[in-house]
């Protein structure tokens, strides 16, 4: 396959590109879902193709073909260069690229149990059994369970001389129960909303122990139907790790993407409230806030060996004791901004142009090994504890956000109290992170996966990871509903 | 300009005869006694992206995708591939058939479509299919040139073409094709603290020749100029004039969560057929045959796509169906199925809201005190049954007083039920000009006018 990638690169260079790289991608997926005791869908897909990227002046050109022949690969390279040349009608200054030593390397996701080798019937039986178990709760009208697996094999070659072969495997799934009564619809999910995904094989799914968790998922969904609404007001907010992971994704992960900061995503995804000139000095949050982008975390959904520019996976400090110190970057954006490339450029399949994507952007656990959710609750006189994401929305500068969660519990005098429905909280990013004052320690830290991060035009979907442990934020606005 | 300069190695991508042959060969590989649907989709998509007033990304992808549903004794499974050689065809059919042999029986399986004639939508323009990077760059250049001093442009121009062949083991074989071209972008002014003035322009058609980059750019540039000097306004209930992009966003949520027959059958939809849920000014159809629409006259299951009146003068009159929901309801499919609709349900894809008689100036002229909103941003559903949605305003929000736009304001967060917003008595005016408007689900899905609504609930501003 390296011959095909090399042919594409040579085609682009011969057509005038100043730099080119190409990826031959062979990918397969399997996804299954069940609802109310029946298998709802079983989908398998296989895809192969070549994507080639050519730099000419101020613009990238990109072309993709499905035909895996040397002739087609070379011609794709030529087209990528021709497309880039057409950009000269609306030119800018030439795009610089941060230098990168050539790499010859191989990487494979560690897999204990090949998810594609597990019999389909076994997977279906599990999903059906989960939904049947949740339906035992009379108020549950919709019981759903799903799982999905991806295997992506890539051969990368660049005009810098890199040759990298990788095999990445992602696995996961989850379940949810929905209770409906009149105009009220309530849902509970496990391990988190939309499922939990990690790099690895079927051992990831087995590790969730889904059958052991159907009971509380169903009964809490039913209980929410008659639970009081989360009252509106300003109070102390405790978030579970999975909700905090999405908070990190939206209010940190996207905000630190260098392409957004530079305005390259302005029209669609938006920009960022972070001015590049304040890198190293801007206060993002409290001293407890320590964020890293780490593509080397075992099992993290944003873990790999090399990004789609051939940059090695690495750990980069993003926020150090509350101060913004790092960005997510690629070779072009890093060179423009004068920072080191962080190996954070990935593409969705062979047919898309690689772009800056989150790896595992997470909050390091609190410094006190003994700190825990239980200790945080015990230390809270009045507040609410919110669990599992239900909705998310944030503005185009990543400042003004609103999240809804599936369930909440009131907290009074250090004790969890009544279950509350429809909890929502809102805030402004740096003010919110500045109010972080308690953070559970390593024992309750987990790298949560987001399997559906959308960005770019054409839209690309990436799988990203976000480490988090339960945390408390002071004086947060809670409880605004439609 | 030549089609070959950037758009594609093959002249066979849209060779209908070749695609039909692929479908027939796939069907021939289906095990005896099994039912099957084969979809062969040819896609060409090229996109030129600009930011900071220059083109920075330029991409082109062309592919043929084959997806197969095989059902054995009521046990269906799907498989897909982009390999069109003999081995690829055999593998994709075997993948689906092998899976169908072991999955449990699906009681909702409604069989495959039988022979039925389909009507082409006619939304195909060869010049759009053949559009090259220079064509797109010229449109971008015209957009960028419309900007004023200190304004920076960002956006995209793309051209796309889709040809779909659907064939079933029960004798259906249908083909249709559609093209699309879009210019979409913003101008940004100089930042004012945490606020950056922005204006927006958008045009979509199945004909690239219909697009006027300068006109779209002028709209965005004028909007950005008008948005300079915005002040904050207290959140609360405001009368609003919503421009077409906002209306398109509302309608896509109502369509996906409300008029989706699966949602209704699961008890998650607000729709009660025969109920007057909306204002009499609301008439909503899903009509891929509208001359302004973009789309195909056959769905992913092989059923002819029908024009469906969802709301007639405020009364909910129909749902969109795929074969499963139709069988359960005892009706025929409206041709809104897809390979994914087993899980997500049938979706309207060509919504058209009936237009009125008012200009935007008329709509604004009737408002004592309210807000004019250009676009919504990052809308998410809080409650599916009321279609309660939170989101933000974007690309220009303006205060209206005594029938005139008097000042720009900074972006606001809203939390609003889309059903309630269009309830009887709440629609105070409907724009005379309806066009294909963009939404977060992509361009080319909704034909919408501007609307004047009695109330919209803004729940937060820049201060939180």
Image (tube, grey):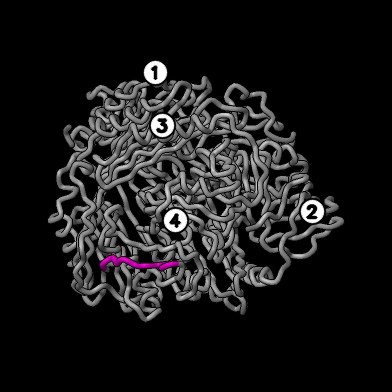
Query: Which x, y percent locates residue A238?
Result: 74, 51
Could you tell which of marks 4 and 1 lies nearer the N-terminus?
Answer: 1
Write down the residue under mark 4.
A149
Cβ atoms under marks 4 and 2 closer than 8 Å: no
Residues rendered magenta in the picture: B304-313
How far apart marks 4 and 1 lie (CA) works out to 42 Å
Could you tell which of marks 3 and 2 lies nearer the N-terminus?
Answer: 3
State left or right for residue A31 relative to residue A5.
right
Write down the residue under mark 1.
A93
Q: Is residue A98 above or below residue B339?
A: above
Could you tell which of marks 3 and 1 lies nearer the N-terminus?
Answer: 1
Numbered disc 2: what chain?
A
Write down the residue under mark 2.
A383
Q: Are marks 2 and 1 on the same chain?
A: yes
Quarter of the view holding residue A182: bottom right
Could you tell which of marks 2 and 1 lies nearer the N-terminus?
Answer: 1
Q: Quadrant of the C terminus of chain B?
A: top right
Q: Residue furthest left?
A: B17
Label 2 neighbour load within 10 Å: few <14, some 14-19, many 20+: many
How far apart marks 3 and 1 lie (CA) works out to 21 Å
Could you tell which of marks 4 and 2 lies nearer the N-terminus?
Answer: 4
Which numbered disc, 4 or 1, marks the residue closer to the eye? Answer: 1
Numbered disc 1: what chain?
A
């Amino acid at each position: 396959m390296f011959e095909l990638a090399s042919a594409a690169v040579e085609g682009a260079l011969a057509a005038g590109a100043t730099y080119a790289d190409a990826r031959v991608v062979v990918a397969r997926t399997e996804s299954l879902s069940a609802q109310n005791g029946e298998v709802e869908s079983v989908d398998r897909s296989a895809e192969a193709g070549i994507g080639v990227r050519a730099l000419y002046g101020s613009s990238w050109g990109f072309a993709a073909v499905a035909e895996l022949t040397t002739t087609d690969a070379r011609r794709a390279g030529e087209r990528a260069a021709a497309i880039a040349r057409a950009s000269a009608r609306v030119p800018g200054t030439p795009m610089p690229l941060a230098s990168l030593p050539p790499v010859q390397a191989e990487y494979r996701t560690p897999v204990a149990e090949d998810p594609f080798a597990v019999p389909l019937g076994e997977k279906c039986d599990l999903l059906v059994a989960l939904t049947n178990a949740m339906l035992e709760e009379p108020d549950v009208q919709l019981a759903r369970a799903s799982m999905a697996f991806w295997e992506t094999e890539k051969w990368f070659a660049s005009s810098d001389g890199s040759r990298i072969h990788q095999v990445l495997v992602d696995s996961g799934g989850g379940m949810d129960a929905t209770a409906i009564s009149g105009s009220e619809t309530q849902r509970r999910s496990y391990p988190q909303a939309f499922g939990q995904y990690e790099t690895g094989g079927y051992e990831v799914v087995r590790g969730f122990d889904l059958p052991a968790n159907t009971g509380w998922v169903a009964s809490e969904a039913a209980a929410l139907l008659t639970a009081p609404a989360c009252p509106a007001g300003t109070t102390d907010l405790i978030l579970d790790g999975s909700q905090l992971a999405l908070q990190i994704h939206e209010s940190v992960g996207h905000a630190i993407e260098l392409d957004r900061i530079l305005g390259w995503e302005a029209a669609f995804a938006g920009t960022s409230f972070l001015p590049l000139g304040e890198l190293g000095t801007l206060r993002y949050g409290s001293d407890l806030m320590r964020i890293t982008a780490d593509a080397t975390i075992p099992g993290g959904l944003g873990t790999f060996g090399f990004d789609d520019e051939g940059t090695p996976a690495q750990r980069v400090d993003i926020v150090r004791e509350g101060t913004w110190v790092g960005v997510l970057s690629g070779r072009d954006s890093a060179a423009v901004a004068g920072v080191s490339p962080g190996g954070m450029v990935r593409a969705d399949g062979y047919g898309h142009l690689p772009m800056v994507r989150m790896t595992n952007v997470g909050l390091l656990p609190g410094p006190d090994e003994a700190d825990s959710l239980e200790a945080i609750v015990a230390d809270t006189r009045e507040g609410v504890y919110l669990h599992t994401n239900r909705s998310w929305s944030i503005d185009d500068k990543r400042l003004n956000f609103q999240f809804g969660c599936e369930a909440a519990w009131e907290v009074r005098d250090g004790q969890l109290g009544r279950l509350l429905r429809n909890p929502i909280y809102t805030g402004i990013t740096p003010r919110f992170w500045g109010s972080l004052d308690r953070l559970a320690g390593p024992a309750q830290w987990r790298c949560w996966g987001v399997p559906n991060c959308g960005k770019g035009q054409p839209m690309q979907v990436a799988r990203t990871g976000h480490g988090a442990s339960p945390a408390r934020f002071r004086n947060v606005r809670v409880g605004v509903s439609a | 300009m030549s089609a070959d300069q950037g758009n594609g190695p093959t002249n066979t991508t849209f060779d209908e005869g070749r695609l039909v042959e692929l479908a027939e060969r796939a069907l021939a590989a289906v095990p005896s006694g099994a039912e099957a649907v084969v979809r062969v989709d040819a896609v060409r998509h090229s996109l030129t992206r600009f930011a900071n007033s220059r083109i920075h990304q330029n991409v082109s992808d062309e592919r043929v995708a084959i997806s197969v549903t095989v059902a054995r004794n009521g046990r269906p499974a799907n498989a897909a591939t982009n390999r069109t050689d003999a081995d690829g065809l055999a593998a994709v059919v075997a993948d689906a058939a092998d899976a169908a042999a072991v999955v449990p029986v699906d009681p909702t399986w409604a069989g495959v479509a039988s022979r039925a004639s389909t009507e082409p939508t006619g939304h195909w323009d060869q010049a759009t299919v053949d559009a090259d990077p220079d064509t797109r760059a010229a449109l971008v250049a015209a957009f960028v040139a419309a900007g004023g001093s200190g304004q920076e442009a960002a956006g995209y121009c793309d051209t796309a073409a889709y040809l779909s062949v659907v064939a079933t083991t029960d004798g259906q074989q249908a083909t249709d094709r559609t093209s699309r071209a879009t210019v979409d972008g913003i101008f940004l002014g100089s930042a004012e603290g945490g606020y950056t003035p922005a204006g927006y322009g958008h045009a979509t058609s199945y004909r690239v020749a219909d697009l006027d980059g300068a006109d779209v750019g002028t709209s965005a540039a004028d909007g950005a100029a008008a948005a300079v000097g915005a002040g904050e306004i207290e959140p609360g209930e405001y009368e609003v004039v919503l421009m077409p992009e906002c209306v398109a966003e509302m309608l896509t949520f109502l369509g996906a969560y409300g008029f989706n027959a699966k949602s209704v059958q699961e008890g998650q939809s607000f729709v009660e057929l025969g109920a007057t849920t909306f204002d009499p000014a609301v008439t909503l159809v899903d009509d891929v045959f509208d001359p302004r629409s973009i789309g195909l006259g056959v769905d992913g299951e092989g059923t002819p796509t029908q024009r469906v009146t969802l709301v007639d003068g405020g009364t909910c009159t129909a749902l969109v169906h795929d074969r499963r929901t139709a069988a359960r309801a005892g009706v025929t499919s409206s041709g809104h199925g897809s390979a994914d609709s087993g899980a997500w349900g049938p979706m309207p894809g060509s919504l058209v809201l009936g237009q009125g008689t008012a200009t935007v100036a008329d709509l604004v002229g009737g408002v004592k005190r309210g807000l004019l909103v250009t676009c919504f941003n990052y809308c998410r559903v809080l409650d599916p049954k009321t279609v309660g949605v939170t989101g933000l305003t974007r690309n220009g929000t303006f205060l209206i007083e005594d029938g005139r736009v008097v000042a720009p304001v900074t972006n606001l967060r809203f939390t609003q039920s889309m059903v309630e917003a269009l309830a009887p008595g709440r629609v105070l005016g409907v724009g005379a000009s309806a066009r294909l408007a963009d939404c977060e689900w992509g361009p080319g899905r909704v034909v919408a006018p501007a609307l004047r609504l009695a109330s919209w609930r803004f729940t937060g501003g820049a201060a939180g």
